[in-house]
Image (cartoon, rainbow, N blue to C red):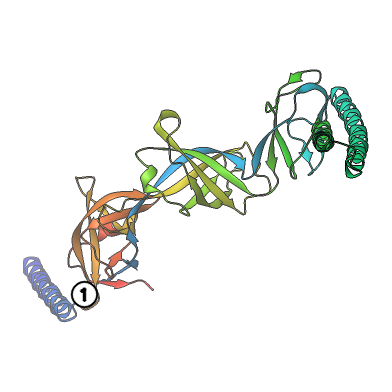
Amino acid sequence: MGTKLELLFWGRCNMTKQALKIILWLVFILITITACKEKPEIVEEVRAIKTITVSEPATSQIRKFSGIVHAVDSSNLSFEVSGQVETVNVDIGDRVKKGQVLAALDKEPYRLDVDGAQAELVKAQANVVNTKEEYDRQKRVYDQGAGAKGRVDLAEYNYKAAQSVVDYQIARLNLAKRNLRKTSLKAPYNGSIAGRSVNPHEEVQTGQKVFEIDAKGALEVQLAVPETTIHQIHISGPATITFPTLPGKSVKGSISYIGSAAIKANAFPVKVGLIEPPAKTSPGMTAEATLVLTDESRETGYVVPLQAILPAKDAKQGYAFVYDPKTSTVKKTQIRSRGGQRNMSIIEEGLSAGDIIAVGGVSFLADGMKVKIME
């Protein structure tokens, strides 16, 4: 009896296991069918790109040159007469006004010259009076029929000669007075003393430099440009000036002078006028001028940002991605550059005016990729 019950129990258990397997298989098949019917929709991702339109032609490059700030109006001052320096009233850096006495010579020798010329003039004027009286007397006697024509002519000649001596002595006196005035050296305009090369009690000669004065007002930077570059700059060409002692300050400038002859090391003198320089800008400061060099012999190129170029093995080669608005795709285009300026590259080949190119994330783009323009 017990054996039959055990067989019945194990038989029912086997039937339950089979039923459970069938149910699990049915659930699995149902899930698989449902998953196949509900496939997720694949959404194509379109990358947004930042673009620019190629338009700016470039036939120029940028070069930097070191220079010194100078006043536009600057003069070397000297005495117009020689003598011993008596006083020096200013020093380097002093600000002066027009007409201010900067230095003076010993005036005594020139006062004596004035006194001598004055005495000679008095003497000459007295001689005129005497010769005039003699001439009048000889003429009166001759008119009465008692004199000789030769004596009249001689008296007239002496009288006119005496008048000429007076004129000469007047001119000599004026020159002596002028020389006396020139013993004081005066400032020709408002400005500052940039150089001094004289001390009291020194003997100076006519024309010897004693001061250098810079006029108050307009400033310029004087440069030396190599002979290989001088023909690539032009009068009125733009420039940007920076100063090591004034970090963060830059000034616009314009080329005002280009020398016609080379000076030291085959470099030509060039002057750049400063436009509204900072108040702290002074003559003698060092400066750096950034000039635009124009090479008209080169073909026209286009200026584009460096980040728009995908590099290639050749340093002058690269790739740009040109956007096609009709298909909303980019085309990988080979380009050739001829250098750059600041953070820009000058493209000689591969691009045309009006091309729309990507300027960011170009390493993630591919030829024919569908994109949209970033607003």
Q: Residue drawn at (58%, 45%), measured in percent from left and top?
A: 220
In the picture, the quarter occupied by the C terminus is bottom left
Kindly identify which residue carries mark 1: 42
| Label 1 element class | loop
Where residue 153 appears, as percent x and y from the top left, is: 80, 37
Q: Position of residue 188 (x, y in %)?
A: 74, 42
Q: Is residue 28 above or below residue 283?
A: below
Residue 134 placement (x, y as % from top left): 91, 35
The reply, left or right, for residue 139 in relation to residue 75 is right
**Going by the image, does 251 lie left or right of 147?**
left
Comparing 144 with 167, the one in front is 144
Residue drawn at x 89%, y 34% as measured from the top left: 131
Q: Name the residue nearer the viewer: 264 or 349.
A: 264
Q: Is residue 223 above or below residue 207?
A: below
Quadrant for residue 229, please give it: top left
Q: Is residue 147 visible?
A: yes
Q: Is residue 329 left or right of residue 156?
A: left
Q: With 48 as the anchor, is 249 left or right in this view?
A: right
Local crowd size for mark 1, using a 10 Å CA cut-off: few (<14), some (14–19), many (≥20): few
Give residue 247's position: percent from left, percent from top: 59, 43
Tell me what residue is drawn at x 9 percent, y 75 percent: 22
Q: Residue furthest front?
A: 145
Query: Would you identify the image quadrant in which residue 76 lies?
Result: top right
The kind of residue tagged 1 is: Ile
